Amino acid sequence: MAGVNEGTVPMLEVWRGGLLECSHLGHAVICDAKGVVESWGNPRAVIFPRSSAKMIQALPLLETGAAAARGLTDAHLAFACASHQGAHLHVDMAERWIADLGLAETDLRCGSHEPYDGTERDRLIRANDRPCQLHNNCSGKHSGFLTVTQHLKAGPEYVEIDHPLQKAIRAATEEVTGESIAGWGVDGCSAPNFAMSVGGLARAMAQYAIARDGHGARESAMHRLTRAMAAHPELVAGEGRACTELMRAMQGRVALKGGAEGVYVAIVPENGLGIALKIVDGGSRGAEAAIAALLARIGVLDATHPAAVKRMSSTQRNWRGLETGCLKMPPGFPG
Amino acid sequence: MAGVNEGTVPMLEVWRGGLLECSHLGHAVICDAKGVVESWGNPRAVIFPRSSAKMIQALPLLETGAAAARGLTDAHLAFACASHQGAHLHVDMAERWIADLGLAETDLRCGSHEPYDGTERDRLIRANDRPCQLHNNCSGKHSGFLTVTQHLKAGPEYVEIDHPLQKAIRAATEEVTGESIAGWGVDGCSAPNFAMSVGGLARAMAQYAIARDGHGARESAMHRLTRAMAAHPELVAGEGRACTELMRAMQGRVALKGGAEGVYVAIVPENGLGIALKIVDGGSRGAEAAIAALLARIGVLDATHPAAVKRMSSTQRNWRGLETGCLKMPPGFPG
């Protein structure tokens, strides 16, 4: 294991007036069933996966039988893996899910923040209303957490590190990454987030990529979560967001997920590949460019698709629409 | 001259759960009247100063006699150097300034964006109104630009590179930095932004720090702009912002200015020092921490002041107020 700042390589350049203005450094790993296929930076760098771990955190939802008992749909499962933007669509889905459980918004433990969705934000402001926990970008994950908690008849403080749900997530994390956790921290939504190497996260994503339906609870869960996410890009993030736009560009072939502080992962079943990356400065600009570039490299994303160009090589414009510069992939990445 | 990504050093660490989650790299230089006093990273790294050049861009306002002819106050001059947050205070000031010139909002060339100020943003949304150019964080600078343009009887397209105002700014830039410009780009507000080394920017700030009133037009202008900024922290940025809070913490002794994409400068008359820094990933989190740490190092900012702690070493909390980690200055910076 290594510090996140050790052995990074450039992953995005930001140019202005013909000069390099900014540069984002990071680590990236592509794995298949057998291990590392290709890497940039240090595969042993320790990171917090943040929200890119949501498909791991959703495993107990299927493996405990809670999802089946509640008759959850693929839309629910995609939403459980989402960092959504609190649009009406998302808030409504969280509200109905929690009501179906016979629970209330106050049973959530994710906290409240202003929705990223402009329409919903403006609606709240005009109504002199405040965002609630349903608006939290993790409210889908927490709806899933509540579903498992209820199914297990466990206590209400489901984000505590010794809660049965979090113990199950920790065990699943170690199994799919093939590593002991490197530590843990509290995430923005109050759930524990387990630290791992970038390589371990890529290995986990490769397990999802090769998982077969009907080959045991773990493989079936990984198989279904991957397809649910790829089939519902609008639930996983929202309009204009990288996850949603890039998944749409790949037409259901790939499941993608970003995480706070510059993390991105991809699950590519047709190639049996998993990808994980971390931009060490935490910049989502760099992470979105790097995942698009890696998806193009392995042949599942057309680098000339507008959703790819926007992140990797677009002309940058200012408030008056004047060209100010451009994004560029650095020499050597991804090569 | 060197690329901005060459020879950087760590300037801020972001920790979570006892592990390093993110790191920001950059360059920083402290200069006095004679040159570089101390540096971190590469003083020859080429950067765009962005809004940290506003006190250079304001020199023609004084040196052409435009400010005197119009009877501009220190508040006007501070506002000409501002990246304000479009609070009522700022919008009102821009509106009155432009009206005093007999001009209209449409004479501005900065473009419109949503104000950063929450109260003004919410007011616009509730009124079903749209932000105008007065809300642009650079509307003070552009009010100054219009004042010079009118005084010079120059054409209305004052952001064009061959406009007399921009030619004057380019000449002033080369004079105060002691360098030929390294290139130029178009800024977010459409004005040209002249590239320079980090060391050149620090040298320029040192010229401001040692400038004496009554010693020629240039020195008088630099002297007055520095005092105007230091006396009006609320105009230079706004409530909650680093520039405003840190300047208040230093009680008028220092003029501070941030720039987009991780730039920060300080002018410290009592020590005759100028500081410039650039975080290479463009992160303001890193730039604000680094400038606070350097101001503490040279003895003008109390590192235990809440405004300093907030940027350099604060506990980080999530939406529910739970502790998630902390900010830390890296070993060796600033030493």
Image: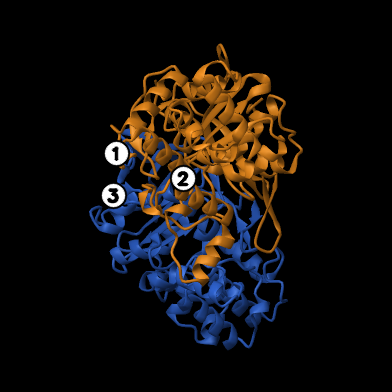
Chain colours: A blue, B orange
Q: Residues within 10 Å of mark 1 (few under 14, many from 20)?
A: few
Q: Chain of mark 3?
A: A
Judging depth in this view, the residue of A11 and B201 nearest the camera is B201
**Marking on residue B155:** 1
Specify whether disc 3 shares its chain with disc 1. no
| On-image quarter of the N terminus of chain A | top right
Instruction: Name the residue carrying label 2.
Output: B138
Q: Residues within 10 Å of mark 3 (few under 14, many from 20)?
A: some
Query: How far, Cα to Cα, is label 1 from label 2?
Result: 20 Å
Image side of residue B302 versus residue A54, left or right: right
Above or below: residue A88 compared with residue B47: below
Tag nearer the camera, 1 or 2: 1
Query: Which is closer to the viewer, label 3 or label 2?
Result: 2
The answer for how far apart the CA atoms under marks 3 and 1 are is 50 Å
Q: Amino acid at mark 1?
A: Gly
Please state the horizontal and vertical placement of residue B213, each as a whole percent of the image. 60, 20
- Disc tally is 3
* Amino acid of disc 2: Cys
Same chain? Circles 3 and 2: no
Task: Give the residue type at disc 3.
Answer: Arg
Residue lying at 61% horizontally and 77% vertically, measured from the top left: A148
The quadrant of the rendering that contains the C terminus of chain A is top left
Marks 3/2 in contact by CB < 8 Å: the verdict is no
User: Which residue does the numbered mark 3 point to in the structure image?
Assistant: A297
Q: Secondary structure at mark 1?
A: loop
The chain holding disc 2 is: B
Q: Secondary structure at mark 2?
A: loop
Image coordinates of residue A193 in percent, x first then y, are 61, 58
The tag earlier along the polypeptide, 1 or 2, is 2
Query: Which structural element holds mark 3?
Result: helix
